[in-house]
Amino acid sequence: MGTALVYHEDMTAARLLWDDPECEIECPERLTTALECLQQQGLEQRCLRLAAREASEAELGLVHSPEYVALLRGTQALGTRELQALSKQYDAVYLHPVRALADPPPSHTSGTCACSRPALPCAVPCWLPLQSTFHCARLAAGAALQLVDAVLTGAVRNGLALVRPPGHHSQRATANGFCVFNNVAIAAKHAQQQHGLRRVLIVDWDVHHGQGIQYIFEDDPSVLYFSWHRYEHGHFWPHLRESDADAVGRGRGLGFTVNLPWNQVGMGNADYVAAFLHVLLPLAFEFDPELVLVSAGFDSAIGDPEGQMLATPECFAHLTQLLQMLAGGRVCAVLEGGYHLESLSQSVCMTVRALLGDPALPLSGPMEPQGSALESLQRVRAAQAPHWVSLQQQGAAPVLSPGTPCPEGRPSPLPPGEPEFKAAVTQAADALSVLLEQLHLHPTPPIRVAAALTVPDAGRALPLGVLCEEGSLPREEAQAWARPRETLAQDEALAALGKVLYLLDRILDGQVSSGMAATPAPAAAATLDVAVRYGLSHGAQRLLCVAVGQLDRPPDLTDDGRNLWLNIGGKEATAPSMFHVSVPLPVTTGGFLSCALALVLPLAYSFQPDLVLVALGLAHGLRDPQAALLAALLRGPAGGRVLALVDEESTPQLATVLASVLNGEAPPSLGPFSMATPEDTQALMYLRPRLEPRWKMLQRLLECCDLAA
Ligand code: Q9C
Ligand code: ZN
């Protein structure tokens, strides 16, 4: 199951033909540069290339009024000056004529032609590429439709449509903010009407509010629309009251519009990941979409003149990976904004890498959300709490009054030309060159998953593409790591340990990204104990161990900051600390999701491990889909360096599904959502405030804002 890349070069034809500083950033080079970058990094070649088709007028009519479509059709008869006048009737829109070139390009001769392009009012010869905004905008919408069709027919698992003009600001009868037809909204309606989908999630990570999408679906409970956006208490375009967190939808659609306004510029990786963990993903898992559409604007990335945010390109790989936990991995990303060509291109590449299943580069920078971001997260959680069970589980959130200023020095927006603006541009350039260096220093390991199994035949159950590892550390060497008088004295346990350590070596030296190994039941704890010590002495700088079930923490581990031990459903820690955390096994799917999203991942993203061990002890108690989701989620924080240890007596399906998620496949559905039990909730409510001072991604609100409210 592959990744589609939908594109058509005609979409580079439309450009701004008059002087308008507001619109000039939306240029054809946005597409050509992104595509070149994909080719250079060898990513385009790994995708299924699809040529975009034009959306039909009936398809445009899924969202737009017939009069509006007719008006746009009519623009094909207009000249440049008339189009300039018409453009002025909209906010931040330009339209391009059918034909801007004075002379036909020399490469073309008219000759005889069998093409069936419908006659146009101004008789463009059929050998000349159509350049009209109408044509480009129909291709943009058609590209989104084609992508959705490719995913929903099973031709590919996911994909990206590289399109211009963008769509999310466009409304039923109006163009707005460079957008002509609402590509993603049309694709969502199409998915429902042509493929019978009942629940579609739209994630709008563009830095602007996609008010067009919001208006189209605001009373529709079958489409959950999430948007974060630069807002600055309404001072940022499009200056709408309904972009704030308290706009939650209308009528039957109450709670199906989720707005996360950023009231400061400078939001970075920690803020974006926190928004996903604490707002979007709890709601999205409860919603249980059948398809995820992404309004993938990259003006929310570092260096963008519009967004002035600080998230680095690899952040989009993490966001993409997180979204693939939903809807069986059916994620369709459609380009919206993004105006810093280098940042845009790198971010597009990171998104495609994640869609292809490659591990994400670890996130750079301190993983600590900003005060203003926490305040925004808090406000949207409070506004949505009445509509979502998963937000009610952890105590009613206090409602913050709108406009609470956060007494904290934060960068204010930068006017171009100021020295600070130049500094921001330099900062972006630095971040991008560091990223290129990272890609160079840490190339994607040649092998994505290697599995070591004890049962001789078990290799047959491995998913396609997973290497069955036969290598092993010499017996004496493995034995030297075992503690005296232990279960590891058994022959087969020692053989299994040798394989585990061999796998660890290959992960630590960058040959293999992830590993999966089976261990004989009685030796599970002893094997994990050795694996932790071996990892720490063979190059792991920070090792996170997530142990599920009765697995004791190695007695000689110290709180030296190099290891973090998290036990789920085992014995309660006798001396809990910031580096030794134990939590009871959650009972329901809701409890499990809270544990994963509100505890495990925030801890993991804060700790920034370079190696994760996930161990499932005997009778660990997680259901296979839960274990798979946990392992899949833990790929993010460690840049894919995950070693999963399973009991050889657990189901053969468990080994298979773990290998497949470590290989980048989507985890299976958890089944119907059920609310967390009070016990599940209490455990988290007890732990989180104790751990927050050290592990900042756990934070959901900043005390100072709380007090100010
Ligand atoms: N100074 C997209 O990113 N200009 N559209 C706002 C603020 C319009 C952005 C002016 C920005 C439109 C798809
Ligand atoms: Zn935008």
Image: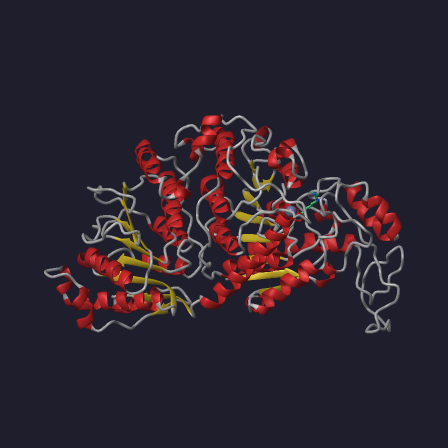
> Along the line of sight, which residue is nearer the eye, 525 or 137?
525
Q: Is residue 610 above or below residue 221?
A: below
Q: Residue furthest left?
A: 485
Q: Vertical placement of 221 versus 125: above or below?
A: above
The way the protein has been coloured in the rendering is secondary structure
Q: How many marks?
A: 0
User: Residue at position x 63%, y 32% from top?
Assistant: 242
The answer to whether residue 652 is visible is no
Q: Quadrant of residue 697?
A: top left
Q: Quadrant of residue 484?
A: bottom left
Q: Quadrant of residue 591?
A: top left
Q: Horizontal placement of 93 versus 511: left or right?
A: right
Seen in the picture, residue 107 relative to 558 is either above or below; the reply is: below
Where in the figure is residue 178, as x and y percent of width and height?
Answer: 72, 48
Q: Residue at x 62, y 42 (%)?
A: 413
Horizontal arrangement in the rendering, residue 644 relative to residue 232 (left or right) = left
Residue 459 in picture, x, y percent from top left? 32, 68
Towards the viewer: 263 or 594: 263
Q: Residue at x 17, y 67 (%)?
A: 480
Indicate the position of residue 630 as horizontal and vertical percent values. Answer: 37, 50
Can residue 535 be seen here?
yes
Query: How far across and down, in percent of the image, does residue 606 sit?
Result: 39, 48
Instruction: Relative to 6, say whether 78 is above or below.
Output: above
Q: Closer to the camera, 246 or 436?
A: 436
> Going by the image, does 288 lie left or right of 261?
left
